[in-house]
Image: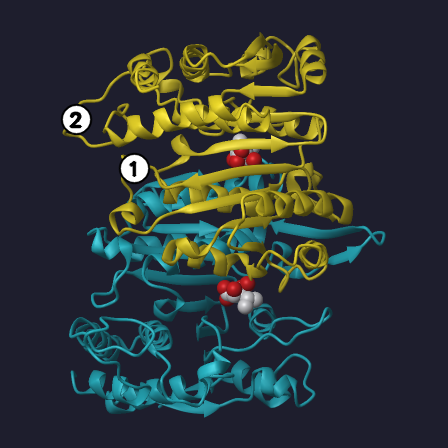
Chain colours: A cyan, B yellow
């Protein structure tokens, strides 16, 4: 049986991961799970990347990491564990799909505007290199790096994905009117790659204009590809369109290793209370099953989740207040009862 | 009588400026206007900053520039005229106020969520310096600069403004979890300045999280202060919340010169047709009147505008389709008839 690495994460991580793995178990998903030690809790034990050498080796052997949310340790020299993981394994494409979910009310769902947007974000470069320093006591500088091969790999991935899902449109967002050289390079690569995909409608938009249009006409977009930081911002905006990060799956795609994760916070205030919402992690897990070719399991679980949400079953953080909230375990049971 | 410089701009600029000045005239605004030559059309005549030396001198003498939208000339070495103007006169704070307007429907107004957000954006630093180059054929680098005095002046301005308007909250948005040094400096200055304003509720938020919250709970924000590019993106997002850039005033505040402007596009496709919407430019003009202490004129014009919109009078780009659209001149006349 295929084995994958699982890191439960910090805060609410363990309880939502347990809920998701229970759902996978009930769905008879043909996977075996190898638990690995990654997270703020590992950092606190003295491992400054937030992971043990064993964890790293296991992940490199198995190729797939399924992870819960992780807290970023505080301190100036310290890097986010999520970012370290993405960089360590060159997972160059961060892919997040935002779809209207019946049962999760937003101003857009109420207005009858359907959302179906996939953001593909370059995941390694830009100012995420953390190449920064103080030139004097008063002047700070950060280097923003954009490379042709780095842009090429994520843009090619985005076009392949767009073709596979028969996207209506693939849009490159950028600020090439100001960052004419760096974003200019990213846009140039996009336009070059677009020539190989005449079947797809490819266009570009300035990132600020994109953000205005995402809140006025979000249904006109489909696949959007961006550089790292702009992609980070646009991803969260799009998460808001469908109800928040609690409903947004995330996949970090590399040639050798892929990471599927929940990207919402670790919610320390409610950790251990069995009331957290496992939906984002479950949606990430469903994406992972598809990636592994386990289409039947993925579809069965996804249908059960969508049906459960439609029924109005919800944890305390969302849903119709006139239907009382269930806890994490009950939410998972409601899903498995809908297989 | 106080004299100010007026640049009509490109595309629809001249016709919306004429409409606004007609409204000012009917309102007996005690101002005299000195027309100056700035815009893409001036660039095309061979002035590579997009302005004539006479224009520059007039503006420096008068201290106030009221301007229509301007087109950015194409080409790698060429800078945006708007950005050049902001930099030339060190207008360090870009202030945009986004308020729900009755008669301008959005998903938020339909859901009964009121918007009243002022974005104060640092207007000079960040990657807007345009310090970029190719290191090799494949690697582009841009320098992002954040300085203490630059951050200080805009943050102090934001706090003063927040105090004057008795803001419910002033929020610093940043990405200091990744750009620990540059955005860390901006955040540090914010926290330092906040100590001098114990009457104000000051807090900070990561910029991606802000964008998620702006589309889910926009009514929880009031004044938001940010670095340049993040501020650019968040400004447009907020414009979308109230119906688009056609309804968003903009002021560039410096110690010696202030620029009040419409920041939407020049809409070359409809230029000269007398159908463009002058609302954003008029709102910017109203902000300018307040800045000049002309409170009575400002209030009279603002009330007339708000009442006109509420009546359902609209240009072709917005409003209730069952009420037929008016042209630019008629829109201005409807406003003056409501004085
Ligand atoms: C936690 C943070 C470092 C991270 C990022 O900026 O990439 C997060 O916002 C995300 O989107 O996954
Ligand atoms: C036109 C462009 C250079 C400008 C900017 O990026 O500042 C615009 O987006 C704005 O917000 O005024």
Q: Position of residue A220 (x, y in %)?
A: 29, 44
Q: What residue lies at 54% left-to-right and 28% top-to-bottom? A: B290
Pointers 2 and 1 within a single chain: yes
**Above or below A181: residue A122:** below
Q: Chain of mark 2?
A: B
Residue B107 % position (x, y):
28, 47
Residue extending furthest front?
B296
Contact between labelled residues 1 and 2, with CB atoms less than 8 Å apart? no
**Closer to the camera in the image, B68 or A130:** B68
Please tell me which residue is depicted at 62% across the width and 17% down the height of the picture: B50
Residue under the image location 66 percent in, 74 percent down:
A74
- Whether residue A165 appears in this view of the structure is yes
Q: Residues within 10 Å of mark 2 (few under 14, many from 20)?
A: few
Q: Which mark is residue B152?
A: none
Depth check, front residue: B189 or B306? B306
The residue where tag 2 is placed is B323
Instruction: Describe the element under mark 2 as helix, strand or loop.
Output: loop
Query: Can you identify the residue that label 1 sits on?
Result: B102
Q: Quadrant of the N terminus of chain B?
A: top right
Report the residue at 64% width, 84% height from top.
A43
The quarter in which the C terminus of chain B is drawn is top left
Q: Chain of mark 1?
A: B
Q: Is residue A192 visible?
A: no
Q: Is mark 1 within 8 Å of ligand 2?
A: no
Q: Tell me the distance, in whole angstroms, between the alpha carbons under discs 2 and 1.
A: 15 Å
Q: Nearer the viewer, mark 2 or mark 1?
A: 1
**Mark 2 residue CB less than 8 A from any atom of ligand 2:** no
Instruction: Report x, y in % for residue A321.
Output: 24, 73
* Up/down of B293 relative to B105, above or below: above
Which is nearer the N-term, disc 2 or disc 1?
1
Quadrant assignment, res A87: bottom right
């Amino acid at each position: 049986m295929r084995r994958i690495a699982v890191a439960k994460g910090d805060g609410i991580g363990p309880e939502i991961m347990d809920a998701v793995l229970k759902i996978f178990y009930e769905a008879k998903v043909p996977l075996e799970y190898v638990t690995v030690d990654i997270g703020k809790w590992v950092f606190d034990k003295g491992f400054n990347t937030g992971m043990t050498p064993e964890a790293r080796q296991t992940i490199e052997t198995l190729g797939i990491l399924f992870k819960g949310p992780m807290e970023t340790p505080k301190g100036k020299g310290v890097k986010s564990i999520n970012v370290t993981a993405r960089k360590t394994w060159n997972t160059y494409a961060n892919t997040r799909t935002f779809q209207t979910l019946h049962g999760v009310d937003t101003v857009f769902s109420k207005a009858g505007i359907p959302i179906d947007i996939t953001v593909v974000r370059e995941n390694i470069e830009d100012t995420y290199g953390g190449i920064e320093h103080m030139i004097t006591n008063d002047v700070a500088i950060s280097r923003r790096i954009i490379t042709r091969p780095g842009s090429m790999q994520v843009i090619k991935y985005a076009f392949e994905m767009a073709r596979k899902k028969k996207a209506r449109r693939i849009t490159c967002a950028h600020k090439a009117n100001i960052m004419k050289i760096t974003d200019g390079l990213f846009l140039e690569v996009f336009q070059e790659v677009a020539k190989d995909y005449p079947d797809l409608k490819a266009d570009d938009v300035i990132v600020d204009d994109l953000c205005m249009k995402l809140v006025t006409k979000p249904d006109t977009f489909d696949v959007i590809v961006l550089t790292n930081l702009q992609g980070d911002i646009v991803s969260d905006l799009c998460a808001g369109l469908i109800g928040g990060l609690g409903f947004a799956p995330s996949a970090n795609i590399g040639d050798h290793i892929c990471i599927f994760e929940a990207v919402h916070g670790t919610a320390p205030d409610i950790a251990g209370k069995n009331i957290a919402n496992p939906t984002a992690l479950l949606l990430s897990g469903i994406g992972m099953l598809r990636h592994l070719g386990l289409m039947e399991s993925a579809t069965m679980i996804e249908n059960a989740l969508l049906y459960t949400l439609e029924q109005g079953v919800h944890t305390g953080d969302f849903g119709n207040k006139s239907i009382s909230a269930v806890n994490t375990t009950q939410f998972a049971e409601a899903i498995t009862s809908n297989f």
